[in-house]
């Protein structure tokens, strides 16, 4: 049975939901400990929430045992400096197992991935989410990458006890506006398309955004968050323009470089997190690598890392 959403969690979900990478050791195994300096920088910058087993975490490239390990070990590294959101997904059996252990692992909320199953019934999605919410008892964030299930089903999902947020990861902003009107303010709609889409979604009433950039430059994400919170769209848009090159690199090869660019940026700045696993693009194409290095030099982070 779900419990009321704590104010700390509700507030954090209206800020930055950062998605942590999954570092690998020299043998290619997950190495959560390598996240320690990345988490510390995020905490110092003021990132509100950190997600383990999200898409930037390569959730679908991890074995189930690896996903369990990341969920089990990352909350202790965060040490309460931000809320921890555990990504939940895969088969209903595996997802329930992750959801059930999430409170014991130290997660503050769960984020339920939208199932990639090719035969998805809208009412089946509702039942899937209900079972995860009941299994964990934690606040639930819905990860909605496809709004094709329809507004009726979205409303039904948001009425499930414990659902506190919807990570809206589709550019259909008018559907988002309609969904927010139907659901009301009991559920926080979050921009799930990262910083570039945060201004238009914020203008419609969404609060907060997801970010993979926080792994590399959390201060930039926090500046955007704070500008949007005070209604300073000019500053937010200027800061978003400054990261446009980074986000453009992440969108190459049909978004297949989304995680690769973040990981290579970390590797270049002295944080050895290993490669991105297939089917992500790795290594980066030489011209993309050169552009990334030039961008990080422009930001001053390569110099800072060397110092």
Image: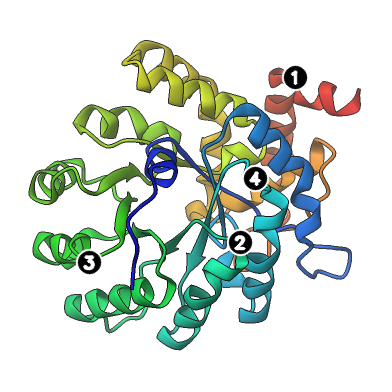
State which mark lies toward you, 4 or 1: 1
Which disc is residue 160 wearing? 3
Q: Which residue is mark 2?
A: 280
Q: Between residue 92 and residue 296, name the one nearer to us.
A: 92
State which mark lies toward you, 1 or 2: 1
Q: Quadrant of residue 92?
A: bottom left
- Please tell me which residue is depicted at 56% across the width and 67% down the height of the picture: 59
Q: Which residue is mark 4?
A: 261
Q: Is residue 88 left or right of residue 166?
A: right
Q: Which residue is mark 1?
A: 300
Q: Is residue 263 left or right of residue 144?
A: right
Q: Which callout, 4 or 1, points at the residue further toward the start of the chain?
A: 4
Q: Which callout, 1 or 3, points at the residue further toward the start of the chain?
A: 3
Question: From what the image shows, is residue 148 above or below residue 164?
Answer: below
**SS of the residue under disc 3:** loop
**Disc 4/disc 3 C-alpha distance (Å):** 36 Å
Proximity of marks 2 and 3: CB atoms separated by less than 8 Å:
no
Please provide percent x and percent y for residue 219. Answer: 61, 25
**SS of the residue under disc 1:** loop
Please provide percent x and percent y for residue 19. Answer: 55, 49
Quarter of the rendering occupied by the C terminus: top right
Q: Quadrant of residue 153?
A: bottom left
Q: Which callout, 4 or 3, points at the residue further toward the start of the chain?
A: 3
Question: From what the image shows, is residue 253 above or below residue 67?
Answer: above
């Amino acid at each position: 049975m779900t419990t009321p959403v704590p104010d700390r969690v509700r507030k954090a979900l209206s800020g930055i939901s950062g998605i942590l990478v999954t570092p690998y050791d020299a043998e290619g195994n997950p190495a959560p400990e390598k996240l320690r300096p990345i988490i510390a920088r995020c905490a110092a910058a003021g990132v509100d929430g950190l997600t383990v087993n999200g898409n930037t975490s390569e959730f679908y490239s991890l074995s189930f045992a690896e996903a369990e390990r990341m969920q089990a070990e990352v909350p202790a590294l965060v040490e309460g400096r931000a809320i921890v959101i555990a990504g939940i997904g895969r088969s209903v059996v595996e997802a329930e197992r992750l959801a059930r252990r999430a409170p014991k692992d130290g997660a503050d909320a769960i984020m339920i991935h939208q199932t990639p199953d090719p035969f998805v019934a809208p009412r089946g999605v509702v039942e899937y989410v209900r079972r995860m919410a009941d299994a964990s008892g934690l606040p639930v964030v819905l990860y909605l990458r496809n709004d094709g299930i329809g507004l009726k089903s979205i409303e039904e999902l948001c009425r499930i006890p414990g659902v506190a947020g919807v990570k809206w990861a589709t550019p259909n902003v008018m559907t988002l506006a309609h969904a927010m009107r139907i659901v009301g303010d009991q559920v926080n709609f979050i921009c799930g398309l990262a910083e570039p889409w945060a201004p238009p979604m914020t203008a419609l009433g969404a609060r907060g955004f997801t970010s993979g950039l926080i792994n590399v430059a959390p201060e930039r994400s926090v500046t955007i968050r704070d500008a949007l919170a005070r209604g300073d769209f000019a500053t937010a848009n200027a800061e978003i323009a400054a990261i446009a090159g980074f986000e453009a690199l992440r969108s190459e090869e049909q978004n297949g470089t989304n995680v690769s660019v973040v990981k290579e940026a970390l590797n270049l700045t002295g944080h050895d997190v290993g490669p991105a696993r297939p089917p992500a693009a790795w290594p980066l194409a030489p011209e993309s690598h050169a552009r990334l290095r030039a961008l990080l030099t422009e930001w001053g982070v390569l110099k800072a890392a060397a110092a």
